[in-house]
Image (spheres, rainbow, N blue to C red):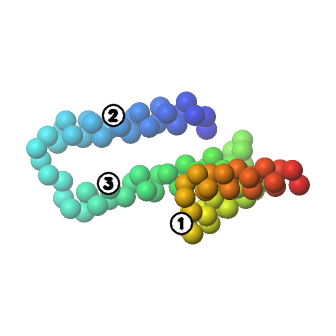
Amino acid sequence: MSWSAILVLAAGAYAFKVLGLVVLGGRTMPAVVSRCVALLPAALLPALIAVQTLTTDDQWVLDARAAGVGAAIIAAWRRAPFPVVILLGAAVTAAVRAI
């Protein structure tokens, strides 16, 4: 999947949100629907990261990218500052590719 496809999908998702506001107007959604809609971005981001990291040409691949993302996940879980998470992920990816 290319960046242009991701940007088109993001624009489409934003358009659907705006369309929902226009269509629903002053109506309120049921609480169950509101909670589900609020959780969608938190579910979509990891899915996009997994697809971009673990697939190449429609095949599952475990390579240096997976190691870098794994290191970044652990650093984020340990509450490292965001620049450290990014640099650690890049450094681990580079080190695995060098090996």
Q: Residues within 10 Å of mark 3 (few under 14, many from 20)?
A: few
Q: Tell me: residue 46, above or below residue 22.
A: below
Secondary structure at badge 1 equals: loop
| Residue located at (21% from left, 62% from top) | 31
Q: Nearer the viewer, residue 90 or 35?
A: 90
Is there any visible trace of residue 40 in the rendered image? yes
Residue identifier under label 2? 15
Residue identifier under label 3? 37
| Alpha carbons under labels 2 and 1: distance apart | 34 Å
| The C terminus lies in quadrant | bottom right
Indicate the quadrant where residue 33 lies.
bottom left
| Residue located at (18% from left, 58% from top) | 30
| The N terminus lies in quadrant | top right
Query: Residue lying furthest right in this view?
Result: 99
Indicate the quadrant where residue 21 lies.
top left
Q: Nearer the viewer, residue 38 or 80?
A: 80
Q: Nearer the viewer, residue 68 or 43?
A: 68
Q: Residues within 10 Å of mark 1 (few under 14, many from 20)?
A: few
Residue identifier under label 1? 79
The kind of residue on which mark 3 rests is Val
The kind of residue on which mark 2 rests is Ala
Q: Earlier in the sequence, mark 2 or mark 1?
A: 2
Q: Is residue 70 left or right of residue 47?
A: right
Is there any visible trace of residue 61 in the rendered image? no
Tag nearer the camera, 1 or 3: 1
